[in-house]
Image (cartoon, helix red, strand yellow):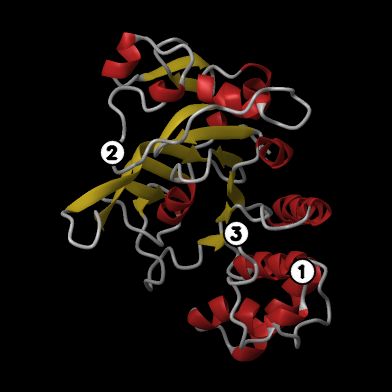
Amino acid sequence: MKAAAAQAPLLRLEGVTRRFAVRRGLWGAQGSLLAVDGVDLNLAPGESLGLVGESGCGKSTLGRLACGLLRPTAGQVLLEERPLPPAGASSWAAGRIQMVFQDPFSSLNPRLTVLASVAEPLAAQGVPRREREARAASLLATVGLENAGSRYPHQFSGGQRQRVAVARALATEPQVVVCDEPVSALDASVQAQVLNLLCDVRERFGPAYLFISHDLAVVDFLCPRVAVMYLGRVVEEAPTSALLKGAAHPYSRALAEAMPGKGGRPLEGELPSPLNPPPGCPFHPRCPKARPLCRECPPEWKALAPGWRVRCHLA
């Protein structure tokens, strides 16, 4: 796999922002929740980029923006330097970005056999029935579920359902697969099986992965590069190995130290509400090294090394 810096981006996010209208209480005034705040990311062909952060930081929203399931309030998502149309639209981009969702128990239609579920994206593209069923059967065999096409989702374990979801995502031969916490609902042994499957799929079919997780150990297994997200913003982007050895942002450092076997203390405090984000650096209310500047001015990007940048006044 070539380094991302040597290739033009396949998928590019430029200043992507997403707000949601919310109402404070039954009779309260309508407000705005800032879920994603000015994110810039590049994904090269065949690359695996991890996206990590706590629950509620905006990772899943960013994943849905990246594959067109949501439209940005501001900024743009580009696929091969062309604006990405909404998912489901009949366009040049149909099927080129797919998503594997977190919950294997709700992401498959319980009324369809798994063969029909895997073939469904091909039906939407007008592929003849015999051809799409043959393709679906081949993909089920690829993920280790040969001769299982006539069964229904409830007849499978969670790990097997996630294998079906991976097969379904591959049906249209996508260039990009967005994986939204695909192993977090699974037991540890089953997690390893699904992660190994994703590695095998990458070697065989060559898709780029945007892999979303709260677990840096999982990201380290699959992704050579990682972006750390906090309260809607990416605060550090680095080679995964470098970040684990010496993260530059205090939040990234806290995540790395909280990994099993590291002996670090859990990060104190709660993630601030995106309804009322703090001024300045969004991490300053929880940062043990925060200074007055951190409370007043949002930090700009600092380049630390090729492929490594951070948003921190103290880095």
Instruction: Return the x and y of residue 44 as percentages of the image width and height.
Output: 54, 41
Residue 285 as seen in the image, left or right of residue 260: left
Judge whether 315 appears above or below 26 on screen: above
| Crowd band around label 2 with a 10 angstrom C-alpha radius: few (<14), some (14–19), many (20+) | few
Instruction: Give the amino acid type for the residue marked by disc 2 in the picture.
Output: Asn
Q: Helix, strand or loop at disc 3?
A: loop
Q: Name the residue under label 2.
A: 276
Of the two numbered discs 2 and 3 in the rendering, the one whose residue sits closer to the viewer? 2
Compared to 55, does 116 lie above or below? below
Q: Which of marks 2 and 3 is nearer the N terminus?
A: 3
In the depicted view, which residue is nearer to us: 151 or 123? Answer: 151
On residue 160, the disc is 1
Which quadrant holds residue 84? bottom left
Along the line of sight, which residue is nearer the eye, 250 or 304? 250
- Looking at numbered disc 1 in the image, what kind of residue is underneath it? Gln
Name which residue lies at 69% across and 54% down: 183
Tell me the crowding category of disc 1: few under 14, some 14 to 19, or many 20 or more residues within 10 angstroms, Cα based: some
Q: Do the residues labelled 2 and 3 touch (CB within 8 Å)?
A: no
Residue denoted by label 3: 102
**Amino acid of disc 3:** Gln
Eye-nearest disc, 1 or 2:
2
Q: Residue at x 71, y 70 (%)?
A: 161
Q: Which of marks 1 and 3 is nearer the N terminus?
A: 3
Quadrant position of the N terminus in the picture: top right
